[in-house]
Image: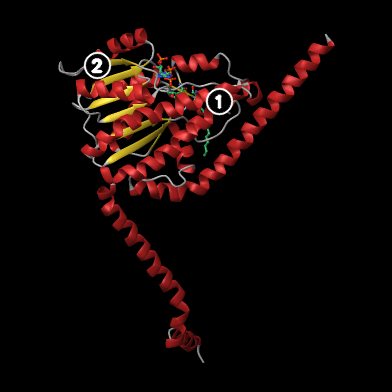
Amino acid sequence: MSSEEALGSALSHWFSFNSWWLLLPFVMLLVVAAFIVAFVLLLYMISPLISPKPLKLNGAHVVVTGGSSGIGKCIAMECYKHGAFITLVARDEHKLVQAKKEVEKCAINDKQVVLCISVDVSKDYNQVESVIKQAQEKLGPVDMLVNCAGTSISGKFEEVEVDRFKKMMEVNYLGSVYPTRAVITTMKERRMGRIMFVSSQAGLIGLFGYTAYSPSKFALRGLAEALQMEMKPYNIYVTVAYPPDTDTPGFAEENKTKPLETKLISETAGVCQPEQVAKVVVKDAVQGNFSSSFGPDGYMLSALTCGMSPVTSITEGLQQIVTMGLFRTIALFYLGSFDSIVRRCMIQREQSKAADKRE
Ligand SMILES: NC(=O)C1=CN([C@@H]2O[C@H](COP(=O)(O)OP(=O)(O)OC[C@H]3O[C@@H](n4cnc5c(N)ncnc54)[C@H](OP(=O)(O)O)[C@@H]3O)[C@@H](O)[C@H]2O)C=CC1
Ligand SMILES: CCCCCCCCCCCCCCCC(=O)[C@@H](N)CO
């Protein structure tokens, strides 16, 4: 047999009916891949159907608790720049009046109004309900509620006074439940609205020094998830914001007593400006996104901890699916570095204590 004949018979053997079966797994793989591609394309096509319609801020009534300072004040200014009517809620009347002046400078038309209400959002529900009612009588039903009143405390677990744990839950958690409860009935009746909870990156990850603060911010996530499931059929969308350290009066106050470990660990995500945070969170709330994160670390952290939280776009869901393993890998390195910060600080403290004793 010549070499050509040999080749010919080998080829004909290859392409004989039986050999086709060898290709079957590949064909099946191809079909499955085609189905997946078609499915993803279909999801993309219907994704505008599952995304909520953006809220129009122009002419909307936005209530901002904690609106007299820091992030809350910047959120109020950001909404005012888009033509909203604002109610600022906080305790200190003097700070409220100052903030009102600053917000008014951002007006885009002469019909806009800023209302100030002095109340402690964490104490008495009836009081909160009655001031919200007053605000609704003056500026109309609330279109968006921003729960930003809050405070932080840091310190080693055994050094934090026991009643501080309760205070954190009262201000950061109940202080968000009460105003939300006060606006929700009207929102349901109108079948529209936005509720924002300002949590923190420390509401997604528990860190050294935040044993009192973190749980109060984690709690907001649970509240938001449960509330969103109840409210979706009423066209009400819930947003949880997870800002990193932000340059505000509250942050300056916190830094006075912050343990070194907490400072060093938090520095990983950097410090950002309240105006930038406000821009991002307002945009996310307007679009009805469930999570609002800030910066690359914030993005990774919220994607990694998405758990069973709702999605508002197919893209968001696909990103979570694709990046989960990678982000967990990165997270393990972060955790390793946090542990080593804690260990180093402990060794340093012990050494300086020993040196003090020798002197
Ligand atoms: N700054 C940061 O690094 C970060 C902050 N956050 C969160 O963002 C929110 C705002 O923080 P920030 O801007 O730094 O804080 P600020 O301390 O600058 O402002 C807090 C605001 O909340 C009000 N407030 C506090 N307690 C009450 C209360 N019981 N009833 C009504 N109003 C209250 C304050 O007014 P008054 O005291 O007059 O009542 C003030 O307007 C907080 O929830 C905080 O946990 C999250 C991540 C990072
Ligand atoms: C893939 C995984 C990435 C992980 C990144 C982790 C980054 C952790 C940094 C946490 C910073 C916590 C800031 C708390 C701010 C705050 O709430 C207080 N300042 C309030 O006053």
Q: Which residue is mark 2?
A: 114
Instruction: Please indicate whether residue 335 sits to the left or right of residue 20 in the image.
Output: right
Q: How is the image coloured?
A: secondary structure
- Residue positioned 53% across, 32% down in the render: 215
Q: Who is closer to the viewer here, 329 or 257?
A: 257
Residue at the front extreme?
126
Q: Position of residue 60 (x, y in %)?
A: 21, 27
Q: Which residue is mark 1?
A: 165
Q: Position of residue 20 (x, y in %)?
A: 43, 82
Q: Closer to the observer: label 1 or label 2?
A: 1
Q: Who is closer to the viewer here, 192 or 279?
A: 192
- State the quadrant of the C terminus: top right
Q: Earlier in the sequence, mark 1 or mark 2?
A: 2
Name which residue type carries label 1: Phe
- Residue positioned 21% across, 17% down in the render: 113
Vertical arrangement, residue 292 with respect to residue 170, above or below: below
Name which residue type carries label 2: Val
Residue 202: in sight, yes or no? no
